[in-house]
C-alpha cells in the first residue's frame, strides 16, 4: 500500500512539474527606443521590438511593453535584421594553407550525396567572429568536381551542427564547365574550373545531362515497381537517388558560372533540364542580365575582393556588375565566398553601393533577398511579426566599416559576441 501511495505521489509530482513547466510564461524581451530598419516597409525613427519565444511578437512606433518584460534600452542604436551570407566556407575551412583544416570538397567529381552539414565544424573560430559583425545566417557550400554536393543554410549560433541547421540541404552545388580557358588576370580568360576549352566543356555538359536523364529513368523504374508488385525495384544507384530531389524540383541547383558565354550555356542547360536554379559567381552577369531576368534566375554575387577577371571590362567591373544586374531586375544577393573573412559580408554590398547600387537594395541583398532565394523569407530576412528574432543593434549604418555592433540576437537569444579577435584585443590592451 505504501509503495502504491509513493508511486502515486511521484507520478502526481512529475505531472504537476510538467504542468508548471508548460504554464511558465515565455521570456519576453523589449528592445526600446531604437531606430528600426525593418528592410520591408518604412524605417521607424524611434520604436520598440517585442521578442517572445524567440520570435518577433510586435514591432512598431507605439508598441506597448508587456509587464515583466526584460527591457533593453536602445536609444541611439539602430535595429537591423541579421544579415545572411549567401555563399561561404564557414565551418568547413579554418586555415586555407593547412590541408588538415580544410574540408570543402570530397574526392571524385560526382558527389551529389555529399552534405556540407555533416562536415560542419560548429566550433570553428570564424563563426563567432562573423556573428559579431551582424551576420546571423550563412549558406555553407562544398566545392570542386562537377557536382560538388549539397550546401546547407545555418544560423551562426548553437552548440552542434544540427542545432545550427536551418536547411540541412539548401541547394545542390554544380561547378559548370567553362567554355573558355582558365580564369586569368592580365590576359583575360574566364572560368574558375580552368577548363581546357570548348570541346572538354561540351563533353562535361553532356555528362551532366546524361546524369540527370539517368536519374529520371531510375525514378520511373522505381515508380513502376511500386505499382506493379511483380516487378522488382532497380538496383540502388546512389548518384541517381540523391539527384531525385533536384529533378523533382524540391531542391534547387546552385550553378557556379562566370563568363557571359558560360552563363548563357548554363541558362540553356537549366531550361532543357527544367531545373530550379540559382547562379553563383556571374562576374560577367551584366553582359547577360536580360537573359537572366527573362529566365527568372536569382544571382549570388561572388567576392568583390577578387581581381577583375577580364581587364578589358574595366577595373571596377566587379563593383558595377551587381549594380547593372539589379537595374535589369535580376534578384541579387551578396556573399563573402570565404570563411576567414566572412565577417566582411556587409562591405561587399557597400562597395556596390559606392558604385551606384541603391543603398536600400544593397541592404536587401544581404537580408531579405537571400532569404527569398533560399525559401526562408517567411522565417527571417526582415523585422516583421512572426519571424525569428534575428536582430542586430548597431551604433550606425550596418554597411559602414566604422559602425560597431553592440548586440546580436539569434532566435531571441542575446549572443555572446566574444571571439578570437576580442580575446587578442584584451590581451594586447594589457601590454
Image (cartoon, helix red, strand yellow):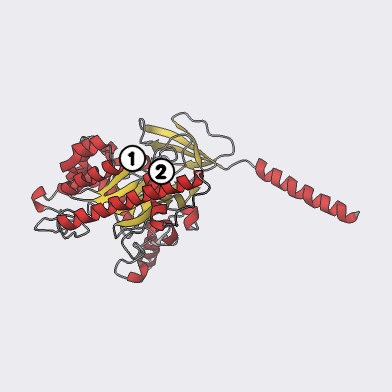
Q: Is 337 or 127 nearer to us in this picture?
A: 337
Judge whether 348 appears above or below 69 on screen.
below
Q: Is 192 or 90 nearer to us in this picture?
A: 192
Tell me the SS state at disc 1: helix
Q: Residue at x 41, y 57 (%)?
A: 238
Tell me the SS state at disc 2: loop
Question: Marks 2 and 1: which is nearer the front?
Answer: 2
* Residue situated furthest right in the rendering: 1
Image-based side of 191 in relation to 54, left or right: left
Q: Which of the numbered marks, if any, corresponds to residue 369?
A: 1
Count of all numbered marks drawn on residues in the image = 2
The residue under label 2 is 250
Judge whether 96 appears above or below 202 on screen.
below
Is residue 227 visible in this depiction of the protein?
yes
Image-based side of 205 in relation to 160, left or right: left
Q: Is 123 or 344 nearer to us in this picture?
A: 123
Q: Which of disc 1 and disc 2 is earlier in sequence?
A: 2
- Residue 93 image position (x, y, % from top left): 35, 63
Image-based side of 17 in relation to 70, left or right: right
- Residue 363 image position (x, y, % from top left): 31, 41
Residue contact at pointers 2 and 1, CB within 8 angstroms: no
Q: Residues within 10 Å of mark 2 (few under 14, many from 20)?
A: few
- Residue 117 image position (x, y, % from top left): 43, 57
**Rounded to the nearest whole Å, what is the CA distance between mark 2 and mark 1?**
20 Å
Amino acid at each position: 500500500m505504501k509503495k502504491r501511495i509513493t508511486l502515486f505521489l511521484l507520478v502526481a509530482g512529475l505531472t504537476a512539474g510538467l504542468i508548471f513547466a508548460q504554464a511558465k510564461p515565455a521570456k519576453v524581451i523589449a528592445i526600446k527606443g531604437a531606430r528600426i530598419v525593418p528592410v520591408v516597409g518604412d524605417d521607424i525613427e524611434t520604436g520598440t521590438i517585442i521578442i517572445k519565444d524567440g520570435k518577433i511578437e510586435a514591432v512598431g512606433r507605439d508598441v506597448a511593453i508587456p509587464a515583466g518584460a526584460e527591457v533593453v534600452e536602445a536609444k541611439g542604436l539602430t535595429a537591423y535584421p541579421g544579415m545572411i551570407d549567401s555563399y561561404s566556407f564557414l565551418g568547413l575551412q579554418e586555415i586555407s594553407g593547412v590541408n588538415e583544416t580544410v574540408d570543402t570538397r570530397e574526392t571524385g567529381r560526382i558527389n551529389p550525396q555529399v552534405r556540407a552539414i555533416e562536415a560542419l565544424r560548429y566550433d570553428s573560430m570564424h563563426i563567432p567572429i562573423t556573428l559579431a559583425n551582424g551576420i546571423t545566417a550563412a549558406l555553407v557550400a562544398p566545392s570542386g568536381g562537377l557536382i560538388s554536393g549539397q550546401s546547407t543554410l545555418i544560423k551562426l549560433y548553437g552548440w552542434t551542427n544540427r542545432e545550427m541547421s536551418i536547411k540541412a540541404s539548401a541547394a545542390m552545388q554544380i561547378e559548370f564547365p567553362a567554355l573558355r580557358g582558365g580564369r586569368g588576370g592580365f590576359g583575360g580568360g574566364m572560368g574558375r574550373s580552368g577548363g581546357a576549352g570548348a570541346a572538354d566543356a561540351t563533353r562535361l555538359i553532356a555528362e551532366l545531362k546524361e546524369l540527370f536523364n539517368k536519374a529520371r529513368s531510375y525514378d520511373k523504374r522505381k515508380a513502376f515497381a511500386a505499382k506493379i508488385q511483380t516487378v522488382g525495384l532497380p538496383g540502388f544507384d546512389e548518384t541517381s537517388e540523391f539527384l531525385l530531389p533536384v529533378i523533382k524540383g524540391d531542391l534547387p541547383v546552385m550553378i557556379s558560372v562566370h563568363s557571359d558565354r558560360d552563363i548563357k550555356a548554363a541558362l540553356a542547360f537549366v531550361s532543357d533540364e527544367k531545373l530550379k536554379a540559382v547562379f553563383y559567381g556571374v562576374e560577367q552577369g551584366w553582359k547577360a542580365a536580360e537573359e537572366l531576368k527573362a529566365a527568372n534566375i536569382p544571382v549570388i554575387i561572388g567576392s568583390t575582393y577578387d581581381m577583375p577577371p577580364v581587364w578589358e571590362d574595366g577595373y571596377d567591373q566587379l563593383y558595377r556588375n551587381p549594380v547593372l544586374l539589379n537595374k535589369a531586375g535580376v534578384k541579387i544577393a551578396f556573399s563573402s565566398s570565404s570563411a576567414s573573412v566572412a565577417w566582411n559580408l556587409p562591405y561587399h554590398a557597400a562597395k556596390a553601393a559606392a558604385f551606384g547600387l541603391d543603398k536600400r537594395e544593397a541592404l536587401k541583398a544581404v537580408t531579405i533577398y537571400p532569404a527569398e532565394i533560399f525559401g526562408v523569407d517567411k522565417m527571417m530576412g526582415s523585422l516583421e511579426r512572426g519571424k525569428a528574432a534575428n536582430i542586430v543593434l548597431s551604433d550606425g549604418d550596418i554597411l559602414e566599416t566604422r559602425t560597431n555592433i553592440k548586440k546580436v540576437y539569434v532566435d531571441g537569444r542575446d549572443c555572446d559576441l566574444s571571439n578570437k579577435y576580442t580575446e587578442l584585443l584584451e590581451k594586447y590592451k594589457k601590454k
